[in-house]
Image: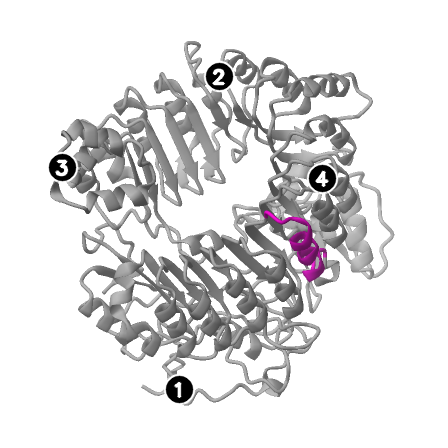
Amino acid sequence: MSSENGKRLLETDAGGLNFEATELTLGLPGEPRVTSDGGAKLGSKRGFSETVDLKLGDNNREVKLGHSLQEAAKSPVSKTQVVGWPPVRGFAKRGKKSCKYVKVAVDGAPYLRKVDLEIYNSYQQLLTSLEDMFSCFTIRNYLNEKKIEQVNGIEYMPTYEDKDGDWMLVGDVPWQMFVESCKRLRLMKSSEAVGLGLTTGPKYSSTN
Amino acid sequence: MNYFPDEVVEHVFDFITSHKDRNSVSLVCKSWYKIERYSRQRVFIGNCYSITPQRLIARFPGLKSLTLKGKPHFADFNLVPHDWGGFVDPWIKALAKSRIGLEELRLKRMVVSDDSLELLSKSFPNFKSLVLVSCEGFTTDGVAAIAANCRFLRELDLQENEVEDHRGHWLSCFPESCTSLVSLNFACLKGEINLASLERLVARSPNLKSLRLNRVVPLDTLQKLLMRAPQLVDLGIGSYVDDPSSEVFSKLKAVIQLCNSIRSLSGFLEVAPCCMSAIYPICENLTFLNLSYAPGLQGNDLTKLVQHCRKLQRLWILDCIGDKGLGVVASTCKELQELRVFPSDPFDAGNAAVTEEGLVLISAGCPKLNSLLYFCHQMTNAALITVAKNCTNFIRFRLCILDPVKADPVTNQPLDEGFGAIVRSNKSLKRLSLSGLLTDQVFLYIGMYAKKLEMLSIAFAGDSNKGMLYVLNGCKKLRKLEIRDCPFGDVALLEDMGKYETMRSLWMSSCEVTLGACKILAKKMSSLNVEIINESEQLEFSLDDRLLVDKMYLYRTLVGHRKDKPEYVLLL
């Protein structure tokens, strides 16, 4: 079988890696990491999530990298992490103040942002921060129903995807509970939401 | 010895307690085998698939204490898929059916169900001790069954398990008549418990020596518990947050002064740095301090605390203590034998909390150091060589440089020489974990010098098959070898197939081993189970033998293929 169908066969020509070719540079997020090209190798399923800078060492050395790193090197993503590294059991539970990054999508924006929910203490803070981040938008603020000055006339409703995969309106549950269950945020155009009867939100105290 | 009656020989054997020694004794002759097997009470099975419960029961009718281990070590780092195996259920069922008077069960990396726990609790009237480490599959209902039914329970020790928490009532299941507890550790449970029940339980357990609380136990309960149990030797604090000017906190300070038996302190699952000063009075007696789960303590807080711990023998800490903090440890803790420094943020090199400097300071200041687990952002050969000069007693040396394949930042060289120095000067080394940029050379050194090495963990290292071969040929005592992401392939795997019979197991993932080679190995060695873990959607095992295998786990066994393998495991 040739390597055209993407299967990872034993390469007898184990030529050295050209460092220039594998040098990692900063760039926009690339294509998805799953080797979906016909199930390349027997039993591969690597998750690539957050990133670590790979300094691949001296340019004069030809170093055979483990497979995970070869994959990482080929990726246009600037930094990649491999599964199971660092080898710390239950790493997320150790010591560090938890940080919970979730993606924020805004209808109509070409790219997403990420926010760390742990740095906020209330819905108010979060929404204010999101407004700053996407400064040309305004977000419908349910918490105190005040009319935020609309810059470009488009209003957005903050929604989030919870642990069960359901899309929920931001603000219904206590803040801590929201932080724990929120997987990602989406600022939905109010005009879309109108038809769904979601124009009035819960009255939830921002001091929760 | 054959001139003595069996009872005398048996009495002599009573003094032989290590598993290894008893195993050796049983091999001397038939008569000794027989005497040994009837008198054996404690059995250790390092791989639950190497033998069946039936054969265990048949050989050791007097069994009282069983230790079982299930999944391979790399399961701790998510490299082994869910449901791979390691089920304790068949063991408990078989033991329950037999006449074995089980008193103690210790499990590591096994899958335990509530039903198993319930059966366990009801089948052995003298059951005394349950220790579960890194297990999963059960809920607090199973724990409740143990509490309710084991009338003479002395030890319930849950360490780092994944337990589904059904909240609260399990603790109340200890009957009022239960007064035998010596050790209770539920730190890994996430849910609420009935605090009043806990207080009453502690109050009626005069023999309680070890108590490790979970995060929901607040400081004021801690204070009440310590009032009831000032005899504690080992304390794991749950939540340690309060206002230092509060009355509760003053009471706590007062009662802690009475707890002068405490030698081991851990937990602090939630902590307010300003409360740490209350701990200082007991620090001078501590031999073990574990702050590796304490969020939010800064370097200074840690350093100030450690300064009081002159008798410390084991320290587990987060890397935010920094190199300077480690310097303080080095000058304070002259009795230190074991140090573990965990990463608080492995992805942020900017926060480089500990480096090679901290390690060098420790090696210079702590002459008794024999066990190390050190996560750092960088390491140099020079530092390792210095450490090797200062410390020649290492039994365990595990170094994890967070950036895989990172070279010596000063010389840009691989770390071969540094690790080489470590193995050369530490002749008693039994366990070694490597990291950083490494070539075949480091393995040459390991094969040459690490003659007592039993366990070796390798990641992202080496250039060719030679690396693996150096190790397999040179390390005569090797029992466990685990390799990930190294360019080792068929030639290395197949060179000395008999070697694997002398080892417990071999793990190779993301290496260059082909399916064909694994098949050859499996065919030749009937005493090995060769498992291929295949997680991709296509389960077409009739694939090309030239395919590189992603995960292979092989282990010696007396009982052939296991019957409980999941679909994605291919047993060759």
| Residue corresponding to mark 2 | B207
Alpha carbon separation for disc pair 4 and 3: 56 Å
Q: Sort mark 2 into few (<14), some (14-19) or many (20+) by Cα contacts within 10 Å.
A: some
| Residue corresponding to mark 3 | B2
| Residue corresponding to mark 1 | A4
Q: Which residue lies at the image location 41% right of the left edge and 33% below the top edge?
A: B131
Q: Are marks 3 and 2 on the same chain?
A: yes
Alpha carbon separation for disc pair 3 and 1: 71 Å
Disc 3 is placed on an element classified as loop
Name the residue nearer the viewer: B433 or B540.
B433
The disc, 4 or 2, on the residue closer to the chain's N-terminal end is 2
Q: Are marks 4 and 2 on the same chain?
A: yes
> What range of the chain is rendered magenta?
B353-368
The amino acid type of the residue labelled 2 equals: Asn
Q: Are marks 1 and 2 in contact (CB under 8 Å)?
A: no
The disc, 4 or 3, on the residue closer to the chain's N-terminal end is 3
Q: Chain of mark 2?
A: B
Residue B409 percent across, percent down from the top left = 69, 72
Q: Sort mark 4 into few (<14), some (14-19) or many (20+) by Cα contacts within 10 Å.
A: many
The amino acid type of the residue labelled 3 equals: Asn
Q: Chain of mark 4?
A: B
The amino acid type of the residue labelled 1 equals: Glu
Q: Is residue A172 visible?
A: no
Residue B328 percent across, percent down from the top left = 75, 46
Disc 1 is placed on an element classified as helix
Alpha carbon separation for disc pair 1 and 4: 59 Å
